[in-house]
Image (spheres, coloured by chain):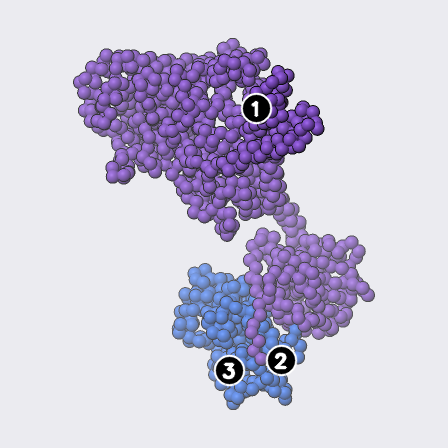
Amino acid sequence: MKNESGPEAYSKMTTLKPKIIVIEDDPPIRRFLRTALDTHGFEVFEAATGKQGVVEANSRKADLIILDLGLPDMNGVDVVKAVRAWSDMPIIVLSARSAEAHKIEALDAGADDYLTKPFGLGELLARLRVALRHAAIPPEQTEAGVFVTGTLHVDLINRRVYNGDQEIHLTPIQYRLLAVLVKHAGKILTHRQILKEVWGPNSIESPHYLRIYMSQLRHKLEADPAQPKYLLTESGVGYWLKV
Amino acid sequence: MAEIERPDPDALLARVAREQAKARRGRLKIFFGMAAGVGKTYAMLLAARERRAENLDVVVGLIETHGREETQALLEGLETLPIKQIDYRDTVLREFDLDAALKRRPSIILVDELAHTNAPGSRHPKRWQDIEELLDAGIDVYTALNVQHLESLSDDVGQIAGIRIWETVPDTVFEEADEVELVDLPPDELLLRLREGKVYLPQQAQEAIRNFFRKGNLIALRELALRQTAHRVDAQMLDYREDNAIREVWQVSERILVCIGPNAIAERLVRAGKRFAVGLRADWIVVYVETPELQRLPAERRDAVLRVLRIAEQLGAETATLSSPNMSEAILKFAGDRNVTKIMMGKPSRRGWRRFVLGSVVDTLIGEAHNINIYLLGSPQKTQDAEEVLPARRRDVLPGLLQRSKTRKKGYYLGYGWAVGVTLISAALARLMHGRFEQSNLAMIFLLGVALIASRFGRGPSILASILGVLVFDFFFVTPFHSLAVSDTQYLVTLSAMLIVAMLISNLTANVRYQAKVAAHRERRASVLYAMSKDLAAAESEAEIVSTAVRHIHAEFGSLNVILFPDANGRMRYPIERGMPESLAGADLSVAQWVFDHNEMAGQGTTTLPGAKAIYFPIDDGSMVLGVLVLEPVNLRRVFLPEQQKLLATFLRLIAQAVTRLRLAEQAKIVQLQVETEGLRNSLLSSISHDLRTPLATIVGSASILAEDDGSLKAEARTELSRAIYDEARRMSNLVGNILDMARLDAGMIKLRKEWYPLEEIIGTVLTRFGNRTDDRQVKVALPPGIPMIYADAVMIEQVLTNLLENALRYTPAGSPLEIAAEMSADGVEISLADRGPGIPAGLENRLFEKFYRLHDETAQSGVGLGLAICRAIVAVHGGSIRAENRAGGGAIFAFTLPLEQQPPSVAHEE
C-alpha cells in the first residue's frame, strides 16, 4: 500500500500548500515534524504552548492541527475544545502509549484522529491525508448517496446494503450503527460517540450493546469476523470503518 | 552591631511550660478540709493568684463563692471560664464546662467541690471524673474536698453526724492526688464564723446542717481530716524510703482477702477492708463465693452483691467471684493461690446449736487456715434484713442493674408438686408391698422417690419429699397405723435414720446436679470461646473478623452490636460494609471516639455517659486501642454479671488478637513485597543496562556517521545506516514499553477498565494489528459458537495475545501454522495459542513466565524477556491463570483462563 501520496490529491483542488499547526512542547519532535512535513509539501507553523497554538490556528487560517496532549500550560483536551468552539478543522492528537483515557477524552471533545508516540512518517502522512480529505469532502455528500469500500456498498438513500452482488439484510439498529460508521468513515469513533448517535444519550454507559451489535454486523458483512477488513476496532477506544 | 531581636523570655518560659503540660499528665492538688466554711476555696484562690504572679496560665473553671466578698475579691484578675447552663426540669443548673476547659487548655485550672454530682446528661456523672479527664489532658487541677465526701469515710462520718452522705469521691482520687493541702480551722473559730453568717448554708437544709455543725461533730471530723492527711504523709515517707532503697521496711507484703456475702454487712466489710488495707499498705481482694444456695437468690440480691463488688473496685480492690458448693473450701483455695495473709469476714450468722450442728464457714476457716489470720466484723446492733440495704443507697453506681428479671417461678412450684406426687406414688407402691415385704424395704421405696426428686428438681422439693416420706411412712406403715404416734421405740431409730438419709441424699444429689450444671455451663462457655477463636483464626480480612465477632457476641449476649475501627486520621467511622441482621445501627460515634481516645468503657451501666443507649468497650491489644465494640444490651445483667464480663473481656481479647494478627501479616506481606521489589529492581537494572545499550550503540554509531558525512557516503550506505537506526529505535521503543508496563503491573498501578467483550473482537483486533506479518502463516481461529463474552480489560488481554503471538512468530519456523482457540473450562474461558514449533524444553514450562527469563540467552534479537511475565501479571490481575505445555504431535500451547465472574449481559433480540 502506498502512503506517501501526501497532499498531491489535495493540492489539485486548492493549488495552495496546506497549512499545518504543530502544537508540541518538545523541540526535537517539533523539528522532526517540521522536516518531515516540509519535505512533503506542507506549510508548518510551530507552537510550544496550547494558548499560542490556538492563536496560531486562528490567525493562520490553518487547515489542520497536530496537537500533543501533554502541554505545559493547558490540557490538550481543552485545546481541542477551544478550537472546536469556532472551527471544524481536523485535529490529530499525539499521545503517549497506554493513555487510552486521554485519547478517548480528546476524541470525545472533537479531535479527529490520534497517533501514539513513537510513530513513523508513513503513519503520520496517512492520517493527515485521511483527515484533510474528510475536511474537503464530508462523507455525507458521497455521490448519489452511495458509499463504497472494497466489496461493500451502502445505499444511504434507499437504506440498502450490499456485499458484492448480494444484498445483506440488516435490522434497524444494525443499519443505524453501520450508517453512523459510514457517515464518519475513516475516522475513529469512540464508544461513547457511537452509543450516543445510535442508541441515544441515555445508553452511553452500556458499551456491551455496541459490542454485541458490532459483532452481529461483522458476522453479516465480513468474510472472517475474527479478522475484519472493514469494521475495525480501535483497541480500548472505539471503532472505525476502513475506507 | 545591629540589635538582634530576642524572644521575650517570659513568652519562652510560658511556651516551655505549655509544652511540658501537654507531654505529661496534669498534677492534682486538693485543698482538703473537715467541713464547709474552713476556707478551702479561699486558700485555693490565694494559691492560684501566686501561680498567676509566677506568670503561669491559670484559669478559673468553676468557683462557688457563695457570695462571700473576700473570696469574690480574690477572683478579680483571674480568667474565668463561662459556666455551662443546663436546663433541667424547669430549673437551670450551672455546671462546669469540661469541653471549654479542654479547648482552652490552661496550665492550671481551678474547679471547686470535687465531690459534686453533675447534672443528668453530662458526660460524666461525677465531677471527679471530669477532673480525671482534665488531668489526662495534661492540665493541672486545683480542687477542694471535705473529709466527709471520701468514699471510705462516708460511713463513719454518717455515723458521727447522723446524716447520710450522697456525694462521694473514690479514695483512689485522693490517694493519687499529687498534693493535698489541709485547710484547718479550730472548731470554735468555725462555729464563730457560722454565727457571723460567713459560712454558706443552702436554704432548704438549714436545720439538718446546723445539727451537723455541733462542736462534738466538728472535733470528730477534724480528727478524721487530720488523720487522713497524716496518713498520706506517712505513705509519702514510706514511698521515699522505698525509692531510696531502704529495704527492711517491708519484708513481707500483706494481702488481705475480704469475703462478702449477700447481706447487709457486705458494704461495711468492704469499707473496713479498705481502711485495713490502707493501714497495712497491703493489697486487698474482695471475693464473693456463690454457692448453689446463693445462686438461687432472687436477682435483686445478686445485683446487690454485684453493686458492692463495684464499690470495692472503686475503692481500689481487686474483685473476684468464685463459684463452688463449698464456701470455706473455695476461700481457702483462693487464699492459698493468691498468698493471702489475712482474711476478713462478717461474724457467723448461725448461732447456738445451729452453728454447732451445721458448722459455719468461719469455724472451718479458723480450723483449716493455719498461716492466715482471720478478722471478723460484727454486725450493727439492730440486724438489718438484707432487703433493707438494697433500696436507695448509691443506685448510681450501676444504674439500671437493678432491673428486675423474670424469675422462673413456674418450674419452681412444679418441683414441689412433683415432690408431693412422687411421695404419694411411693406410698401407693409401699401399700401394695405392705405385708409381703419387710418394713425396711418399704422405707427404701420412699428413699428412691427422694433421690428421684433430688436429681430432677434439686434441694427444696427433695427435702419436702424427705419429710413427707417420713410422715407418710410413719402414718401408714408404722404401728399404730393411721397415726403419727410410734408404739415401738425401735421405729424412732428407723424414722430418724430415714429422715437423715433422705436429707443427705437430697443434699448430695442436689450438689451433684449443681456441679453438673456448672460443668455444662463451663463446657458451653469453652465451646463458645473455641468456636469464636476458631472462626476468628480463619478470618482473612478485618471485615470477616468483624462479622464473625458480631455474630458470636450476638449469639452469646443477645445484643445487637457493631465493631468500629478508626480511619487513617484516628477518627471513628462506621464500616463501609453492609450490616448484618446482628449489626447495631446508630452507635454514637462521638462516644465511640471518646472510648477510643481514653481506652475506657463508656455508656449504659458505666460511669461515663451512662445516659447512652449502648455500651462502648475499647478493643485493645495491650499496647494500643484498635477499635471499639458497641453493644446494645437487652439486659444489663447479661453483660455485667462477673462471669459474663469475663467472657466479654475474653471475646474482646480474641478480637484484638485476630486484628493484630491480620495487621502483622499485612505488614509482613508489605515487607516481603519490598524485598522482592528490591530484588527485581537489581535484576531489572542489570538486564536493562545491557538490553538498552546494545541498540543504543548501533543508533549512536550510525547517527554519528550520518551527521559527520561530508558527502562521501554512498546513497545505499546512507539508507542502510538510517534503516539500522530506525530498526534499533523501534526495538528500544518496544523494550521501554514493556518495562513500563511491567513496572506499572508490579506497582499495582494498573486500574482495570473491565467491560464485556466478544472474544472474537479482541482476537480480531490483535490479528489486524499484526497485519501482513502473519501473511506467510496459516493462522486458524477456532471459536466455538456459544462462547460467552468475557469481562475484562480488552487492551490488556490484547496485550497478552499480542505477546504470545510475537513469541510464536519469533520462536517457530517461518511458515508453520498457528491456531488460536477458545473453549469453556471449569475455571472460565480458556484461550490458547498453539504452534508447531520446537516446543518447550522439559522442566521450563513455568520458568518461562519469570521475569527476564530467556530461552536462549545468547540470542541478541530477543527483548528483555518480559513478554511472558507481562502476560502472567495481566492474567493474574484478571483473576485467571496462564500455563505453557508441549503439544501432542509437536509444538507448544500457551493457554490462559479468564474466570466468568458474573452472568454476561444480553440484549433483547431484534430479529
Residue A184 x, y percent position in the rendering: 51, 78
Residue B157 versus residue B93 in the image, above or below? above
Of tags 1 and 2, which is closer to the observer? 1
Q: Viewer-proximal residue, A182 or B471?
A: B471
Q: CA distance from mark 3 to mark 1?
A: 127 Å
Q: Which residue is mark 1?
A: B483
Q: Along the line of sight, which residue is nearer the eye, B588 or A159?
A: B588
Type of residue at label 2?
Lys
Which amino acid type is marked by label 1? Answer: Ser
Label 3 element class: helix
Q: Nearer the viewer, residue B131 or B777?
A: B131
Give me the chain that's blue: A
**Residue B603 visible in the snapshot:** yes
10 Å crowding of disc 2: few (<14), some (14-19), many (20+): some
Chain identifier of the residue bearing label 1 in the image: B
Q: Is residue B299 left or right of residue A120?
A: left
Closer to the camera in the image, A74 or B567: B567
Q: Are marks 2 and 3 in contact (CB under 8 Å)?
A: no
- Mark 3 residue type: Pro
Q: Quadrant of residue B380?
A: top left
Q: Is residue A118 visible?
A: no
> Which residue is most to the right?
B889
Say which residue label 2 marks. A220
Q: Which residue is mark 3?
A: A139
Of callouts 2 and 3, which one flags the residue occurring earlier in the amino acid sequence? 3
Q: Residue at x 31, y 35 (%)?
A: B119
